[in-house]
Image: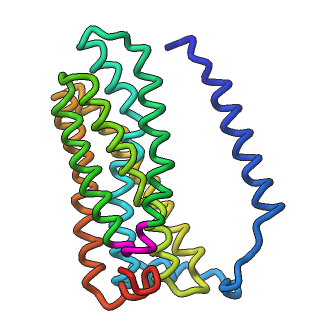
Amino acid sequence: MTDFPWRQVVLLSSALSVAGGAIVLAFVRDGPFSSAPAPFDPRMVFRLLAERGTRLANLGYLGHMWELYAMWTWVPVFLVGALEGQGSTASLAGTIAFSVIAVGGLGSVVGGVLADRWGRTAITSAAMVVSGASALSAAMLFDASLWLLVSVLFVWGFTVVADSAQFSAAITELSPPQYVGTSLTMQTAMGFLLTLFSIQLVPMVVDSVGWSLAFAMLALGPVVGVAAMLRLRALPESTRLAGGRR
């Protein structure tokens, strides 16, 4: 792995980030429903956490984030081990892992369309049920047929991120309009902070007991996330989601 062209990857990623920022500056404008900016108030962080709706939406997001980035980070390594164990060339791992992660783009589009039709709590819960089950299934199929294993990984890649945008959308609908930016910033900061722990835990668990328990650990995130979103669905606040489609 020492000859991996990581500098080119970092440079390309950085260039794409700069290009994305330039596109936003040049072409993105406030929509018709934007609110006047409010003065910065750090107390709003605690107020937003005290609100049932935003608190549960954030808890659902944290469950989602516990799984997502750890899966993206370690599924290539998982595939290398699975392929080598079956006597196949490990060079396939990169291609398969890229495809498994890339299919999430389609999952995000489908998740957004269905959430607008059937409701945010319904789609986020369904996506987390399937992704959590896929995490458990993938670990159990470590030594199974490559076609079966890859099929499960594609389902996992599709569903693990299909709900992602819906948590941000839910926060914009549940938060006070003038403090949507504060609420989204808080959500994002908490989510990415949590990923530091799940990403670091996976290899530690793998070294101790193998992939089975490592991926089972990731499935705990969807369990918590589903519980939070179903609780949110039962609250009056949920009628503010997706035009009343909870």
Q: Which residues are magenta?
A: 114-121
Q: Residue at x 23, y 25 (%)?
A: 207
Q: Residue at x 45, y 39 (%)?
A: 101
Q: Magenta residues: mostly which secondary structure?
A: helix
Furthest toward the bottom, the residue is: 236
- Counting every numbered tag in the picture gives 0
Residue 8 lies, in percent from the top left, at: 68, 25
Whether 223 is among the magenta residues is no
On screen, residue 93 above or below 35: above
On screen, residue 133 above or below 40: above
- In this rendered view, identify the residue nearer to me: 245 or 143: 245
Q: Is residue 134 left or right of residue 110?
A: left
Quarter of image, res 245 = bottom left
Residue 158 lies, in percent from the top left, at: 39, 47
On screen, residue 29 above or below 87: below
On screen, residue 183 above or below 210: below
Quarter of image, res 86 = top left
Residue 152 lies, in percent from the top left, at: 28, 38
Q: Residue at x 24, y 62 (%)?
A: 224
- In this rendered view, identify the residue nearer to me: 184 or 140: 140
Whether 120 is among the magenta residues is yes
Furthest toward the right, the residue is: 26
Q: Is residue 200 left or right of residue 109?
A: left
- Which colour scheme appears in the figure? rainbow
Residue 185 lies, in percent from the top left, at: 55, 67
Q: Residue at x 63, y 29 (%)?
A: 9
Quadrant position of the C terminus in the picture: bottom left
